[in-house]
Image: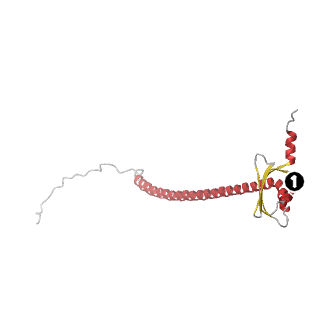
């Protein structure tokens, strides 16, 4: 379809701009906006990188702390084991020092055994309340009581006195039980006791 040519009047008049153009300072606002976005992106990426580095350092420190705690616990366990060994060694030392007064008695009992007798069992108990008293139990393989007499003579040579002895002989075994008290200890107790007039 064709429009007939006709004359159209233009009623538009010349107008000036409604607003004046932006000053130069305000033209920097969009540039600063885009620069701030770029800086924000850069700073956020740096923050996340540093955040991951911080998490890695924290995990590393936690792992080191766990290793150090394990080493500390191992050192404490080793120290406890050493203290237990020291305690055992001290107990053995105390036992050896406490048994030194009994060693001459044991030596004399073993030397008193004749060629036809054998010492099968020997037990010496000492109470903590009165260490001067010894409970002696002997089991000697012999058929006669002469061996026991020889043993008791040797024990008496060490200033021990036997109280409430019991002996049983049968089937080649001699069982002997007695309470031994050192005479010097008994004499000092008697001398310390008050004399009544």
Nearest to the observer: residue 168 or residue 62: 168
Percent x, y for residue 164? 79, 49
Q: What residue do we see at 86% from left, 41% from top?
A: 190
Left or right position of 48 against 75: left
Q: Quadrant of residue 89?
A: bottom right
Q: In this view, does 196 lie above or below 1?
A: above
Q: What residue do we see at 12% from left, 60% from top?
A: 6
Left or right position of 67 against 176: left
Q: Which residue matches tag 1?
A: 156
Q: Quadrant of the N terminus?
A: bottom left
Percent x, y for residue 109? 83, 59
Within-10-Å neighbours for mark 1: few <14, some 14–19, many 20+:
some
Q: In this view, does 54 lie above or below 115?
A: above
Nearest to the observer: residue 38 or residue 172: 172
Q: Residue furthest top?
A: 197
Percent x, y for residue 177? 77, 54
Left or right position of 44 against 128: left
């Amino acid at each position: 379809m064709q429009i007939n040519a006709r004359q159209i009047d233009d009623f538009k008049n010349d107008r000036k701009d409604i607003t004046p153009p932006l000053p130069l300072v305000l033209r920097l606002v969009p540039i600063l906006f885009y620069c701030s976005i770029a800086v924000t992106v850069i700073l956020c990426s740096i923050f996340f990188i540093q955040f991951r580095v911080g998490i890695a350092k924290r995990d590393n420190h936690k792992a080191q702390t766990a290793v150090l705690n394990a080493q500390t616990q191992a050192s404490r366990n080793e120290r406890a084991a050493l203290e237990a060994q020291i305690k055992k060694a001290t107990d053995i030392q105390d036992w050896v020092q406490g048994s030194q007064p009994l060693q001459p008695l044991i030596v004399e009992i073993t030397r008193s055994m004749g060629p036809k007798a054998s010492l099968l069992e020997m037990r010496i108990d000492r109470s903590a309340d009165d260490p001067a008293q010894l409970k002696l139990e002997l089991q000697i393989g012999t058929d006669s009581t002469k061996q026991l007499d020889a043993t008791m003579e040797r024990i008496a040579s060490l200033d021990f006195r036997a109280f409430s002895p019991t002996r049983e002989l049968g089937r080649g075994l001699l069982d002997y039980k007695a309470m031994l008290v050192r005479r010097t200890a008994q004499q000092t107790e008697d001398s310390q006791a008050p004399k009544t007039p």
